[in-house]
Amino acid sequence: MNVGFEAIDGGLRIDDRIESVTYEIGLDGDSVEPAETDPFRVPLTRAVDVTTSELVFPTLPEIFAYCGDEVAFDVTPGGCSEADAGTYELDVSAVRLKLYVRVVDSPVTVDARGDETVVDFGAPTRVRIGVRSLHEHPAGTVTIDDTPRSLMRAVSTFGSALKTTSPERSFPTMRGHPPTIERGERFEAPNHLEPPETGVRIEVPPRYDTVYAVSSLAYYLGATVAPGSTPRLVVGDRAFDFPYDDVARSANAVLRHCFVLDCVVRTEGIYPIDLAERATVLDRVDLDPAALYDRSLAARTAAYLDVPLDVTDDVFAWHLTADIEPSIERAPLLPYLVNDLPFVRSPAPDADVASETPDPATVSEFFRSADIDAFVRSTRADDADGGETTDRPADADGCVVSPVDAETVGHAWVGDDYPRGASKPTIESYRRQLGRRVGEDTVIDVTVVCNDPEMREEAADLYGFRDMIDFDIETCFDLSVAETRALLETDTDFLHFIGHITEAGIRCHDGILDARGLDAVGADAFILNGCRSYAQGMALVEAGALGGVVTLADVYDHVATTVGRSVARLLDAGFDLYGALHVATESVAVDSPYTIVGNGGVTLCQYPFGSPKIAVIDTDDLGTETVTVSIRNYITRNVGPGIFTTSFLSDSAERYLSSPSDHFFEVPYERLDDVLSSGRSPILVDGDLRWSDELNVSEIR
């Protein structure tokens, strides 16, 4: 069973073994009994019964309380509410899992006490607690032959993973993992993976590039993909030609359009919230969300397609773009990518070769006060391999390609060569992610390796300590080849290497270790903060790591130190590799040498309040009494697109969809001062990454 319950002293521990999530609820009873999930209104993975007078959640979650089909009350993070005796089902937005509480014939009081939320029943009460994991294994495997038509049939099965065809499938927990794909002699698929009967069909020319391009759209709409000379969407008895000549552009635009409108319409369902995006859309177009909610998926989609695309194209910022080389060899990776609901394209890259050293103009623009003649990280006269002073590309045969720019934070490249500005995922890294299990030890292990005496300062104070996160940090200096090999093979959650990478491998005090010779790697994720560390990082992924941050070119020490520390602290704050690298390099300009190998959705820590956030302040927007602050949310694999959030800058009950879109708030300086002193969180001030516990209002003013 992927979700486990365990009675502990003073509470209940919930372990999601797929996502390596542990969550503890405080109880004043010790009886935990398995229970059925049937009484709950939504599909759940497991449930237990406990007897307690209160539940203590170690976070400040959003809580919706239902009495029958009606919302009895709605508590925003840190809020309070109460209700008289009755039968209630509480929907609790816990850390990286969905948590539900059902109580019969009992009053309910919800109150925040500091950083905890207490649900009080007034007396010992029988309570049922149910959980749905935010991640699932694929429900089966489809075998295809090497033809586009066979791939079409496989993509048509992706919609079988949807848990509902209602607008609620815009919630990530209502979208299961698409079936996996294997290549074989002929098409075969288990009966339970039949395409859902949604009445939606996508017709495109039978080519690999067009099939890849519509794969996310087909998954989200539960659509069948069929050959057709003219790309179009057939919905019930109506047909809609694709809006643009480019199939990928059309499919991605329609995906965002339908997704945003589903998020608006679902406010008529189980979450009747005040959603900012609903107000934005309804100001632009005359829609009846209540009537649309009750329609079939096909009828609802047809109504959406009658709405101009420009109504929604700036409402929600997408999170991930996947560029897939149009060949059958890439098909087995497709379901793992589509599970994250990316925009999918099959463009031809613009190939070029990375420069040998960073552009001094770019560096001086980023570090205006820095000495641009400072050491390049690879430049040292004491090379252990015989005096070579500049690291060459880690793989002399590799070609750096520049994929077409993406509008999204995350960008994955599925093809040959080394992508600049995009991650390079492998099917093995995704499979390992699904196969992860947690043991008894839930402490996050971080290993910091510094093999250069002049970089010891960079290794200091990289990682902070946050509530609910246990770290075991080991810092190692000046390791030998044998010691470095042993450390790379040792299990750890995160490896942070600070030092030099040569053409031959990772530099140690007595020689060079080539990671391409390793049989196994114990780190889940890593950052290799040395010049041209791409091939060595790719070797770590191929030997067992899930993903990591590497460089494609030489990098100045000042840049490496700043980016390395920023990535580490952002991972500590709950960002995934995509989000951490995006924020850490935002001011480095387009020529940043950093990229991701393997799975860019890897997270190190659990963010306790939905998706990780960053505040943005431009001192040109300072007022006399208030300052304009924008909030950006970074989608992670654990809390995918479709969740909503509440601003910690406002007392309003209005929610908005979590995305990197800027949501602006006018904040009194006194309130901002309270926020800055309430914990440690990232803030971009005039483009510079700062941290709230090291910043005060007087500095901003």
Image: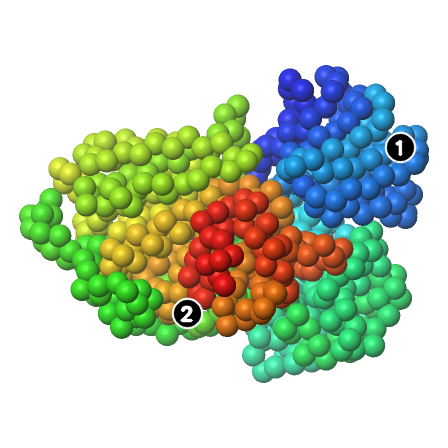
Residue 155 seen in the figure: no
Q: Point out which mark residue 107 bears.
A: 1
Which residue is outermost to the left?
386
Q: Which mark is residue 403?
A: 2
Q: Nearer the viewer, residue 385 or 349?
A: 385
Residue 348 position within the rendered picture, expressed as x and y whole percent measured from the top left: 42, 73
Residue 88 in the image: state x and y as whole percent. Answer: 87, 37
Q: Considering only vertical position in the picture, is 422 above or below 302?
A: above
- Residue shown at 80%/63% (left/top)? 265
Looking at the rendered image, the disc whose residue lies closer to the viewer, 2 or 1, is 1
Q: Amino acid at mark 1?
A: Pro
Find numbered disc 2 in the image and state the secondary structure of the residue it sits on. loop
Across and down, in percent, residue 130 comes to 75, 34
The answer for how far apart the CA atoms under marks 2 and 1 are is 58 Å
Q: What x and y, as percent, mark residue 386?
A: 6, 48
Q: Amino acid at mark 2?
A: Pro
Above or below, 410 relative to 433:
below
- Name the residue furthest bottom: 245
Q: Are marks 2 and 1 in contact (CB under 8 Å)?
A: no
Residue under the point 74% across and 33% down: 118
Q: Residues within 10 Å of mark 1 (few under 14, many from 20)?
A: some
Q: Is residue 595 visible?
A: yes
- Which of 369 and 48 lies nearest the eye of the viewer? 369
Q: At 76% from the left edge and 78% from the top edge, which residue is drawn?
A: 284
Which numbered marker is on residue 376?
A: none
Q: Secondary structure at mark 1?
A: strand
Indicate how the structure is coloured in the image: rainbow
Residue depicted at x 68% and y 23%: 11
Where is the N terminus found, in terms of image quarters? top right
